[in-house]
Image (tube, grey):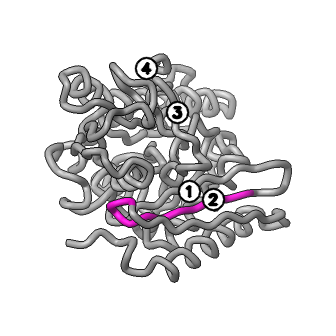
């Protein structure tokens, strides 16, 4: 009999969260089995524990009105700290720039497509939407980026899981919506988008497309954790989240960031916009990564984010 206890994985209960967590559960279970773990059956070696968050319960308001993106992680993080679960799977873009003492992002697996997807039943692209068309999104960043290029659009507040938003689109509540391509792919809905938003022209949310495996600090060096780490994704996310930290990123700030790695050279583009999209503050630079590659990546993000924060000032914060 193995001495390795099961790794209890905390997850939200949406269809997308369960798809993502199920994918990671299978990989964690395989690692535990390879390392002499308790079982080779995923549901025994790494059972999922569904936790309903405040962000899941409240669907009729923007996150910024009820406390920000931390409402998708708070209850799960409490379960980690209490010892009710051993790891948590989050969409990285939902993880706040700072987290509770005692918890860490232990590892980041390989990233999915980071782009925003354009979805419509009638139109092929953002540019083809007619004057005054309704674009559905609850994301301040997507709102600001869309209005920057199409100030005539009417933004319709559209929250809910992927199925809910697609149903609202079908019902005619909006002429088009923007969704994360990664979520559609993980749900087997990669055929749904009519097109994609260029991540260099309109950078996605920092960390979009990546998953975060969060643990207690003392568990971060477990062998199964290291086995799931993707270096390229980790470095890109470090840069993007560095910019997020510098910009005090929250649901009250329209921040986009996209990093790409070519050998040991990391290039990052960061932007922050006024909520109405009228003004955009943007920086791009690159760094050759040294021995402390993750530190170099984060420093690049912090530097570009700080430059934008100084230039944009109060303009980039949503006013009450």
What's the magenta bit mostly, secondary-structure-wise? strand
How packed mark 2 is, by other alpha carbons closer than 10 Å (few <14, some 14-19, many 20 or more), is many
Which quadrant of the structure image shows residue 250?
bottom left
Q: CA distance from mark 3 to mark 1?
A: 16 Å
For label 4, the SS is loop
Q: CA distance from mark 2 to mark 1?
A: 6 Å
Q: Please name the residue shown 42% across and 39% down the image.
A: 8
**Magenta residues?**
267-277
Is there a contact, CB below 8 Å, between mark 3 and mark 1?
no
The residue singled out by tag 1 in the image is: 257
Based on the picture, tell me whether residue 166 belongs to the magenta stretch.
no
Q: CA distance from mark 2 to mark 3?
A: 18 Å
Precedes in sequence: disc 2 or disc 1? 1
Q: Please name the residue shown 57% across and 21% down the image.
A: 40
Based on the picture, tell me whether residue 271 belongs to the magenta stretch.
yes
How packed mark 3 is, by other alpha carbons closer than 10 Å (few <14, some 14-19, many 20 or more), is some
Is there a contact, CB below 8 Å, between mark 2 and mark 1?
yes
The residue singled out by tag 4 in the image is: 192
Disc ID at residue 196: 3
Q: Percent position (x, y) of residue 120?
A: 36, 25
Precedes in sequence: disc 2 or disc 3? 3
Does residue 135 appear to the left or right of 66 in the view shown? right
């Amino acid at each position: 009999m193995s001495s390795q206890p099961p790794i209890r994985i905390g997850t939200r209960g949406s269809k997308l969260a369960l798809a993502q967590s199920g994918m990671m559960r299978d990989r964690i279970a395989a690692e535990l089995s390879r390392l002499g773990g308790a079982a080779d059956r995923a549901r025994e070696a790494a059972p999922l524990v569904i936790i309903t968050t405040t962000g899941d319960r409240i669907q009729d308001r923007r996150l910024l009105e009820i406390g920000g993106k931390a409402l998708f992680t708070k209850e799960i993080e409490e379960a980690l700290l209490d010892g009710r679960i051993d790891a948590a799977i989050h969409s990285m873009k939902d993880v706040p720039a700072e987290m509770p003492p005692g918890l860490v992002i232990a590892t980041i697996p390989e990233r999915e497509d980071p782009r925003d997807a354009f979805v419509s039943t009638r139109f092929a692209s953002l540019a083809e939407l007619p004057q005054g068309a309704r674009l559905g999104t609850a994301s301040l960043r997507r709102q600001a980026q869309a209005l920057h290029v199409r100030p005539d659009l009417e933004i319709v507040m559209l929250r809910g899981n992927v199925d809910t938003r697609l149903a609202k689109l079908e019902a005619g509540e909006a002429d088009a919506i923007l969704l994360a391509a990664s979520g559609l792919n993980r749900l087997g809905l990669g055929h749904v988008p009519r097109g994609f938003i260029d991540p260099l022209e309109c950078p996605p949310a920092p960390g979009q497309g990546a998953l975060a495996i969060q643990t207690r600090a003392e568990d971060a060096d477990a062998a199964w954790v290291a086995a799931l780490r993707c270096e390229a994704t980790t470095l890109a996310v470090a840069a993007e989240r560095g910019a997020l930290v510098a910009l005090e990123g929250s649901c009250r700030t329209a921040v986009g960031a996209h990093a790409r790695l070519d050998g040991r050279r990391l290039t990052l583009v960061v932007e922050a916009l006024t909520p109405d999209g009228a003004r955009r503050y943007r920086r791009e630079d690159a760094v050759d990564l040294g021995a402390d590659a993750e530190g170099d990546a984060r420093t690049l993000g912090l530097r570009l984010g700080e430059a934008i924060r100084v230039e944009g000032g109060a303009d980039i914060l949503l006013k009450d």
